[in-house]
Image (cartoon, coloured by chain):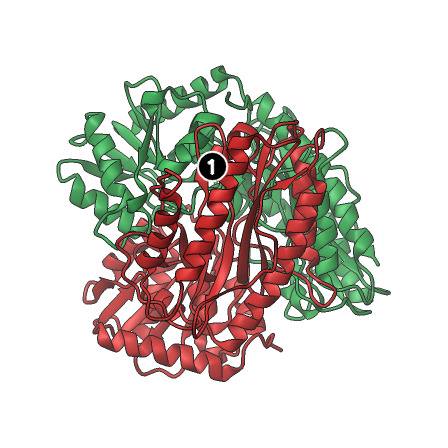
Chain colours: A green, B red
Amino acid sequence: MPRAVFDSSEYDRRIARTRARMEEEGVDALFVSDPANMNYLTGYDGWSFYVHQGVVVTRDRDEPVWVGRGMDANGARATTTLSEDSIRAYSDDHVHSPHDLHPMDFVAEVLRDLGVDDATVGLEMDAYYFTAKSYTRLQEQLPEADLVDTTLLVNWVRVKKSDQELAYMEEAARISENAMQAGLDAIEEGVPEYEAAEAIYSALVDGTDDYGGDYPAIVPLMPSGDHTGTPHLTWTDRPFENGDPVIIELSGCRHRYHSPLARTTFVGDPPQEIEETADIVVEGMEAALDAVEPGVTCEAVEKAWRDEIAKHGVKKEDRIGYSMGLGYPPDWGEHTASLRPGDETVLEENMTFHTIPGLWFDDFGVELSETFRVTSSGAEALADFPRRLFTA
Amino acid sequence: MPRAVFDSSEYDRRIARTRARMEEEGVDALFVSDPANMNYLTGYDGWSFYVHQGVVVTRDRDEPVWVGRGMDANGARATTTLSEDSIRAYSDDHVHSPHDLHPMDFVAEVLRDLGVDDATVGLEMDAYYFTAKSYTRLQEQLPEADLVDTTLLVNWVRVKKSDQELAYMEEAARISENAMQAGLDAIEEGVPEYEAAEAIYSALVDGTDDYGGDYPAIVPLMPSGDHTGTPHLTWTDRPFENGDPVIIELSGCRHRYHSPLARTTFVGDPPQEIEETADIVVEGMEAALDAVEPGVTCEAVEKAWRDEIAKHGVKKEDRIGYSMGLGYPPDWGEHTASLRPGDETVLEENMTFHTIPGLWFDDFGVELSETFRVTSSGAEALADFPRRLFTA
């Protein structure tokens, strides 16, 4: 009895749009191994991406074909509506095999069985979990195939969200608000970092009164003290000290859809330098959000931020946001449109971005983020959480 | 001020042993991209593996070289003792770039700078996060190099644990015990699955009275009801029902070292079939542990389990365990030795395994696991938790 996360008509539309792109690019079959793309096309959901797996889409077969490990076939039955003939599982001696067996040998068999072993086959060459070995193995097994790079083909299909997807992102935003409040409440002088992480995690999974939360694709990040200049550190046993800035970046997750949120707090009285930096970040963020509307380019949004902070003599080199939504570890980002110079992607209604214009210096950083939806006339932040520097 | 997780002499030994293997295999330089291997060789720790990164080890340079994204260089400074010349960072326009820029272009530059661009360079061809594109890009950029597959070279160096590594795994085991108890306490009829997941997660991060827990490389897995035949599903909003078997598989984590533990509980009075299955799993597990000692092969341990369950007319095809310890998402396994037919790896003192001999049928499954260390004369389970079917 599969879980009904989306109507089957939604999956049909996704596959039709994927096929249209395949046709444009002259691709006969697609082997999709990014777990977010597998989920997008079939609903498949499970912590099985630590072994090789994928979904095959061909131009003429109605259903995609799930390919994975034997013990995960039940997971495909539980989370997709694929028919039995569209669930193909390899035996366990393919897993970390001491013999010369690789899961891609089985994938090649499936492609032969589907009659596309001498066709143009698209591979997600730069996707998580599609290893170099997977590629060389498919090359060996499919000498007649024309293997081409279709890394972001499905990701670009994902960029505009449906109403149901947006509803899940809204649900995730409620969770993000609760978790942010829990984190801010937990942080104080003398409390070890992991206790604040525990409060955040607990709120992320506990969700709201009406529903629970999934595991997020990125763990809560909480760099503190002189490590706020280091955005991807995780928590330690260190107690918070008076004088610590602490950045909290987290995301609620609902049916694998995210709504990330970041805020900065300060243990004790913040020095003027940090307060001023926080004000600049807030002003820059609001300038960026004000610039959003359908028809505007991604780079124009970044420029609005950059122009605003330049008034204060501040320059920042990194991008300030990216398209996101559905995701699995290690990332909730889609790797498609980015808010940065040179990205000429034109905004359309119901695209969703995480904009995270932090300012990091060698000894401290201030971060503030919003997940927003492009509306018919502007930007709508999904979470409702004050935009300011907090104190603990 | 780097965190001191291990003495520098421990990293020196690890690198010396890695170099010895490189010499045996005729490899001049190694590009290590598995985050666990990066940590093992340098101490580097951060949630940055969603972008391309790695560590280069050459035969003659004293220090390995960390290569990663600009904003993560501070993370390398914070978690390693590498000198500034051994931290090489690429600019942000390499990240999900709309231009034709790839982080491996920068890695190739580093290899040229280290004078190994015309040497034999080992790549972790089948490691997480080393994509097909990374490989083809290095091929293009290093036409003079001989690129060879060294996927598990460092993983095999990791197999025997040091005293300090074992101490962290013991600490992780204390966390696993607490989290398992929290999960068992939380599960009861009418409670939604996510509330049990929340109790487990909270205990995993809260750790013990003396220290906190890191995020585990795999989220707590908690398949229930007819999904116990589906080992890798995660929690949902469904309330537990009378008659549900529930499998809990989790791991505490300390400085990225794990000690996984699995148990099965039953909501209500378990039917005889499940009680009998649980008894068989316990007996089989104990037969396997009794078979462990230095000098014995991995396949002999699996055979002890298989012979024991065969007495009850039960056959199981999957492997029943694997070497593990240090890890990042998506896996705490090392991908080296497995407890399964055909694996002739000889056990040595201070190897560590997670043995997880579940029996899964189409409509229910029973799982029980232990993390054990090979001692001078047998097996020592790291956690102290009753081996039986629980009831809720």
Q: Is residue B343 shown left or right of residue A262?
A: left
Q: Quadrant of the C terminus of chain A?
A: bottom right
**Who's the residue at 64% across and 59% down the image?**
B175
Q: Is residue B74 shown left or right of residue A131?
A: right
Q: Amino acid at mark 1?
A: Ala
- Out of A41 and B226, give the one closest to the viewer: B226
Eyeballing the image, is A100 above or below B159?
above
Mark 1 packing: few (<14 Cα in 10 Å), some, or many (20+)? many
- The image shows residue B382 at horizontal and vertical percentages of 55, 63
Q: Quadrant of residue A379?
A: top right
- The image shows residue A366 at horizontal and vertical percentages of 70, 58
- Out of B273 and B196, give the one closest to the viewer: B273
Q: Residue furthest top?
A: A9
- Out of A34 and B340, give the one closest to the viewer: B340
Chain of residue at mark 1: A
As helix, strand or loop, the secondary structure at mark 1 comes to helix
- The residue at which mark 1 appears reads as A36
Q: Residue furthest right?
A: A269
Q: Is residue B178 shown left or right of residue B135?
A: right
**Who's the residue at 77% across and 32% down the image?**
A209
- The image shows residue B259 at horizontal and vertical percentages of 54, 59
Is residue B324 visible to us here? yes
